[in-house]
Image (spheres, rainbow, N blue to C red):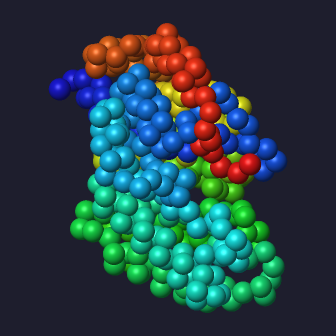
Amino acid sequence: MTELAAVKAALKTQAVETPSWAYGNSGTRFKVFAQAGVPRTPQEKLDDAAKVHEYTGVAPTVALHIPWDRVDDYAALARHAEERGVRLGAINSNTFQDDDYKLGSICHPDAGVRRKAVDHLLECVDIMDATGSRDLKLWFADGTNYPGQDDVRGRQDRLAEGLAEVYGRLGEDQRMLLEYKLFEPAFYTTDVPDWGTAYAHCLKLGPKAQVVVDTGHHAPGTNIEFIVATLLREGRLGGFDFNSRFYADDDLMVGAADPFQLFRIMYEVVRGGGLTSQVAFMLDQCHNIEAKIPAIIRSVMNVQEATAKALLVDRAALAEAQSSGDVLGANAVLMDAYNTDVRPLLREVREEMGLDPEPLAAYARSGWAEKIVAERVGGQQAGWGA
């Protein structure tokens, strides 16, 4: 297989999971903005996700968020997805939108609240069994706002205890993906604030516990690609939540703020052998002012472009420059790949996959946007907040 053929093959097998909540209404802390045609049910979210996959060819799974996507029959929901050409992906828990969780959930000082939180996580594993999902994704808003508010070490003990119970419930082929976040909504201490804390808990739990890297969950200037390289080296990178940030956890479209960073991350993924199904490439974005489906299509395309550039890095030339101490030469190898216009290559890949070479234009011509605006009238639109 030629080098170009290998690049094309990798791009054709890439998979980017889209999040159900990105198809619903979202907004800021002050206002959630409604859009015409937004899904009202989990089934309608899947209908929209199927369109993203139809026009990109690389978005075959959809992550669910519980209770936002709660239904009476999860096996039927899985069938609904499959009938539309997609599958259900990661199950995301929610232990942050209940009054009981004001002081935390799995780390709460009250044993009753901790029990409630763990029971919800166990429910999510039950849902995984019904949907055939592999990954349970955990993000906790737990933390404290003031010094002395709670015992910092004690909260880590509670966290470890709760995670261990859920880990023990996982099936043989299921995984726990632990996400970290620097701050928010807790401002003094956050119970899982960084990759080191997440990694330490996963290491103690066992091989089915992996770390999730959300690209918006770091302090300014953090070298995320170093984290990615290290977790891959340790065999603990379970997946990504791709998005962009300018200031904090902005949840903007991936590649919008710093496409060069996305390229650097994807190069470390390629370098570390992470371009496999063992690393889940997921979007976690809130499309507040832009149209939902086109924004998700564009996001998938941004990931494809960064991946294509990463695959085009001349690794032999890079290794030679690095080993000889050629600082500028090594940097030039990376920059040559980054500055390559990969859009013609991706158009070729799509045509070879039987797809329209221009996904956004194809979607615009499809009439789906007009159809859902006309048909989705009445009912309660999906979304978070009010």
Q: Quadrant of residue 308?
A: top left
Coordinates of residue 321 in the picture (x, y in percent): 43, 38
Which quarter shows the N terminus?
top left
Relative to 158, 203 lies left or right = left
Res. 190 in view: no
Q: Residue at x 59, y 52 (%)?
A: 223
Q: Residue at x 55, y 53 (%)?
A: 68
Relative to 378, 362 lies left or right = left
Q: Quadrant of residue 94?
A: bottom right
Residue 103 drawn above or below residue 21 = below
Res. 208 in view: yes
* Mark count: 0
Q: 76 and 241: which one is in front?
A: 76
Coordinates of residue 330 in the picture (x, y in percent): 48, 37
Q: Residue at x 47, y 76 (%)?
A: 119
Q: 45 and 15: which one is in front?
A: 45
Q: 222 and 203: which one is in front?
A: 203
Coordinates of residue 173 in the picture (x, y in percent): 25, 62
Relative to 13, 246 lies left or right = right
